[in-house]
Amino acid sequence: MKQSTSVRWLTRNVVAIGVLSLFSDMGHELTTAVLPLYLATFAGGAAALGAIEGVSDAASSLLKLWMSYYSDRIGKRKPILVIGYILTAMMGTFAFVTAWWQLLAIRAIAWTGRGARGPIRDALLSESVPPEAHGRAFGFEGAMDTVGAIVGPAIALALVDVIALRHIFLIAFIPGAITVAIAWFVIQYPPRVAREHMRLLASLHDLPPAFRRFTGAAAVFGLGNFAHTLLVLRAVSLLTPRYGPVVAGRYGIALYILHNLLYAAVSYPAGALGDRVSKKTLLFAGYAMFGAMCLLFLTNPASVPMLALLFSLAGIYVGIVDGVQRALAADLLPIECRTVGYGALATANSIGDLLSSVVVGVLWSRVSVAAGFGYAAALTFAGAFLLLLVPTRNPR
């Protein structure tokens, strides 16, 4: 077991990035909670939702690696971060669409902003604390992110059946504007030296072998890690025969809020625990937990208590994996190649998310629900096994 020393980790940047993530996820999750219900008004089902989530992740992955590399090459982070949050705030324009493919287009544009900013934010956060506090810093950011993920769906739940679904999306513009202000005025950006002769392929080649193996394991896991909006859709479909579509829809949003409550509650303790014990072992437990949840969904649970248990498992898994995975990456990456490394990891995750959401959605619609969840469980457990083979070391 690692010895934990008292270090100052709650710096201005850690707090600012945490608050930034809170408001960003508030806007994102507000729209995500309503999206399955809104999509149904355009006659869209699991395949359409899987396509929206998958194409969005694809658009995000196209920029994650390249923008990380470009940020290091020009020696600047602020413009990319600000523009990224501006694009992400565009999801409020869901209010004006007239067809489901327009939802897909807007979500894809918003996710390009998410892809551009994510690795840069993570690299900035990792550099704002000592190495022995990586887990706490990312756990704090994940907890703040999930507070927003609780508030957003809670707002949506309070407004469903009170105002039109499309009008709920307009509220997302408010937290979006706050994120842009924080990224522009509050976060401190240490000066960086431009690396004009830097080449992308060469920088990827210079990444440590252990990190490349870790990225491979995360990518395989990502192939089964589908978007959790599909869980909401499944819960609503299971509960509709008993409660009707309106009440089932409200239960679906409430279960998603429970999911995010557990995510928020677990994020910081998981990060702090990762600073004391093996992050790899903790991450393996998170991977395996998601696989177990997929297998339990194969039983077609149609009761609210059982669905609450499964959504709880999903929330706990995200609380463990989100922060610990990024903290472990920081331990494996030298500081000089950390931005590109986070870009590579984020790209691998996005490609996996793209394929998983699309494949699960298509299997669900064309074969069976069991085929979709079975596929997800198999790839999830495969990623967990590969993770055990990754050599790790103490952080620098």
Image (tube, rainbow, N blue to C red):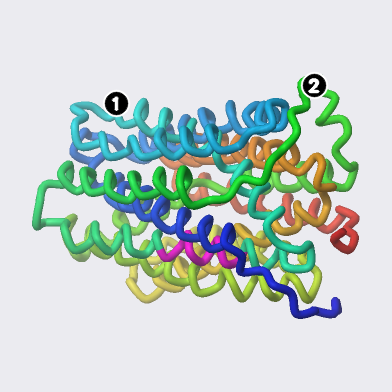
Left or right of 276, for residue 89 = left
Q: Is residue 114 visible?
A: yes
Q: Seen in the image, is 37 located left or right of residue 225?
A: left
Residue 276 percent coordinates (x, y): 78, 76
Asked whether 61 or 287 is in front, the reply is: 61
Whether 291 is drawn above or below 347: the answer is below
Which three-letter amino acid code belongs to the residue tagged 1?
Gln
Q: Which residues are magenta?
A: 139-147
x and y, in percent, of residue 265 in the image: 50, 74
Amino acid at circle 2: Arg
Compared with residue 31, is residue 319 higher up or lower down, i.e. above or below? below
- Whether pointer 1 and pointer 2 mark residues with C-beta atoms closer than 8 Å, the reply is no
Depth check: give the residue in front, 108 or 303.
108
Q: Which mark is residue 102?
A: 1
186 left or right of 40 in image: right
Q: Position of residue 95 (x, y in %)?
A: 20, 37
Q: Residues within 10 Å of mark 1 (few under 14, many from 20)?
A: some
Q: Is residue 182 left or right of residue 328?
A: left
State the residue at coordinates (41%, 33%).
87
Please determine whether, in this image, residue 90 is positioned above or below residue 227: above
Dot 2: few (<14), some (14–19), or many (≥20) neighbours within 10 Å? Answer: few
Q: Which residue is mark 2?
A: 199
